[in-house]
Image: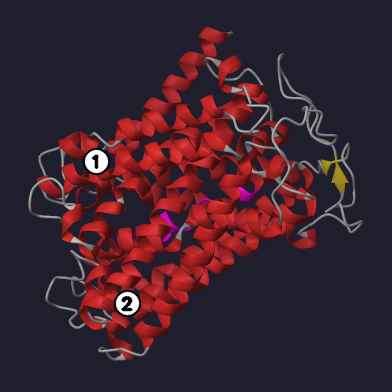
Amino acid sequence: MTTSTSLAPAETPGPPSPGALPYPQQLHRTMGRFASFAAGFSFISVLTTVFQLFAFGYGAAGPAFVWTWPAVLAGQLLVAACFAELAARYPISGAIYQWATRLANPVYGWFTGWLMVLGQVVVVTAAALALQVVLPALWPGFQLLGGDPSPTTASGAANAVLLGTALIALTTLVNAVDNRVLSVVNGIGVTAELVGIALIVVLLFTHTEQPANAVLHTAPVGGGFWTLLVGAFTAAYVMIGFDSAGELSEETVAPRRTAPRTILTALAAAGVTGGLLLLGGVLAAPSLTDGRLATEGLSYVLTSSLGDGLGRVLLADVAVAVCVGTLAMQTAGTRMVFSMARDGALPGARRLAKVSPRSGMPRWAALAVGVPAAAFLLLNLVSPAAFLALSATCIVLVYAAYALVVGALLVRRLRGLPLGEDGPALDEAGRPLFTLGRWGLPVNVLALLYGLAMTVNLAWPRASVYDPQGGHWYLRWFAVLVLAAAVAGGAAYRLRRR
């Protein structure tokens, strides 16, 4: 691929030209390569998301759900490769919004950013609910409300709201304190998570109870392809957020060189480690038929197979990963809100775009993500199964935003319009910018096809996903309703603004 220009903005005010990065440097540029990697890996947060949705994936498709993992990883690597090209040429906060704007036009970019912001808010909510899967299993004293800690019971759902609210309050505080504090917390959290994953994987594979061919079976028997489509929700939920390295570009040293690599390495590392966790969890389970894997997930495997003491130590590491993952997700959402507000593209833009000169943190943007994320937790009180609806809906919104960026990039390729000609052709180390070269078109086409297919699969109103207890039609159609409301609300705002 050759290097070239972005399309001129179609309306005023619009964001400035991408090449020279004319935005004044307000965010503190202190993040190195590991911190950039940590941002993407923390958002993916393998321990958080695998522990949160392992039970759902197993319950939907049985042991064979582990095969959905490499399929989703392959599709997301195609998307990540496209994003890596864009990160090298447009290293700006609010990456998804900024990329879509420069590939198409400000209106298209605004809708893409709007869907991504909503998705990131709900992602924070869903991640915070994961504490309920871990903390009561770690120590029964964390079950502060009622006696049954299962997230699908009334007492478990209420306790999840309490724990989640406390966590979001903490992550909002850290996101308002200082960029250096954020980097340190992320770095420590990612290190602990990587060590924990390595230890858990080794222990699981040295305590196997099931034959290797167990992963060839689906549940219910004969469910086949259709059950695997539902089982793929686990992998789809885990492997999002690798674009966070792009979201933090304006805080990263040498972002044109660093961000493309950390986008790919964060996803690849999460893909490999998460796949091993799933496989090890199935093979180390004491039983595949007693129903506990489909209700308690990996927490059951750790405490049953590895002993109560060691299992609890590892669960403590998972709890750390949940907290740091929620923090990283809120950080990415905060940068998206800040970036859009800086262009005057959101209500209350002047305040949301304000950055503390001392800390370099957009505090009001952090609140704009944290407050609605905490409010979404209340849906868990409507139905104990609402956390499944929230988890599925957030990835629908994120996948839709990803597909809009990949689609705009494909249109640009087909028109023969190159990228970033008003920016440098070399990165900060004097080497050519990351490019897919002649592979750009086929990779882009496959990435778009995968993204659209997975978005439809995730949004399909299956009762088993959105309303397993029945009787709540609005939960069954939750993802479709939220997506429709997001588009309608966004259109109303744009028309009023005009």
305 displayed left or right of 250: left
Say which quadrant the N terminus sits in: bottom right
Q: Secondary structure at mark 2?
A: helix
Image location of residue 460, percent across then percent down:
32, 46
Residue at left offset 53%, top offset 52%: 185
What is the magenta range? 234-245
Residue at left offset 57%, top offset 50%: 448
Which numbered dot is residue 138?
none
Residue type at mark 1 is Val
Image location of residue 462, percent across then percent down:
24, 49
Residue nearer the viewer, 180 or 377 = 180
- Residue topped by disc 2: 281
Q: Can you say whether 411 is above or below 361 in the image?
A: below
Residue type at mark 2 is Gly
Say which quadrant the C terminus sits in: top right
Image location of residue 271, percent across then percent down:
51, 68
Near mark 2 (Cα within 10 A), the count class, few <14, some 14-19 or many ≥20, is: many
